Image (spheres, rainbow, N blue to C red):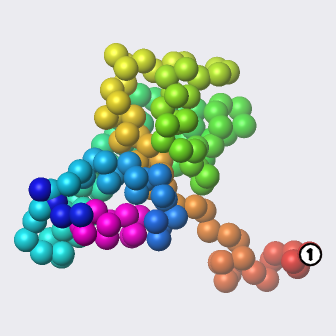
Amino acid sequence: MRSRACSEVFLINAHRLGRPMLAALLAGILGSASSAGSDQHADQTTRVLSAEINKGKLIFMRQGCYTCHGVQAHGALATGPALTPEVMGLVPFKIYVRAPRGFMPPFSARVLAESDLDAIYAYVASIPKDRSPRDIAALIPYLPPDP
């Protein structure tokens, strides 16, 4: 059994990344188990997180989500809405995927398992926000002044 401290360290780190729902999701995936040391906990947490994100990206591609939402889930006006940078909560995400409005087809549990939805959510939630043009030094001279 991972210790509660391991889960708490993971949750703190995930919250620092600005992804509280991802933290909650992965805390549930990791469950509670124990291990030898805190470094081992962190390494194991990182491996589980990376594996879940990679699994989610694979499913996102295999199910064709990228065709409407884009590989980085930024969406497009003509095809589908952006799923990032502001990621909806896990529960609304699952509800919408199962019974969407608009042109998106529904994905029943027979087509997409709950664990697959969790993995897709982990992938989408892991996508970093785009950098602001003001954070790119080479662009600053070409940007209009701040209002």
Looking at the rendered structure, the number of numbered marks drawn on it comes to 1
Residue toward you, 45 or 137: 45
Q: Which residues are magenta?
A: 5-14
According to the image, label 1 marks what residue? 147
Q: Quadrant of the N terminus?
A: bottom left
In the image, what residue occupies the spot 57% across and 48% down?
87
Residue toward you, 47 or 26: 26
In the image, what residue occupies the spot 62% across and 68% down?
131
Q: Position of residue 133 (x, y in %)?
A: 70, 71
Judge left or right: residue 114 versus residue 88: left
| Residue 83 to residue 138: above or below | above
Q: Confirm whether the magenta stretch covers residue 9.
A: yes
Question: SS of the residue at dot 1?
Answer: loop
Judge left or right: residue 22 versus residue 138: left
Residue toward you, 107 or 71: 107
In the image, what residue occupies the spot 79% across and 83% down?
141
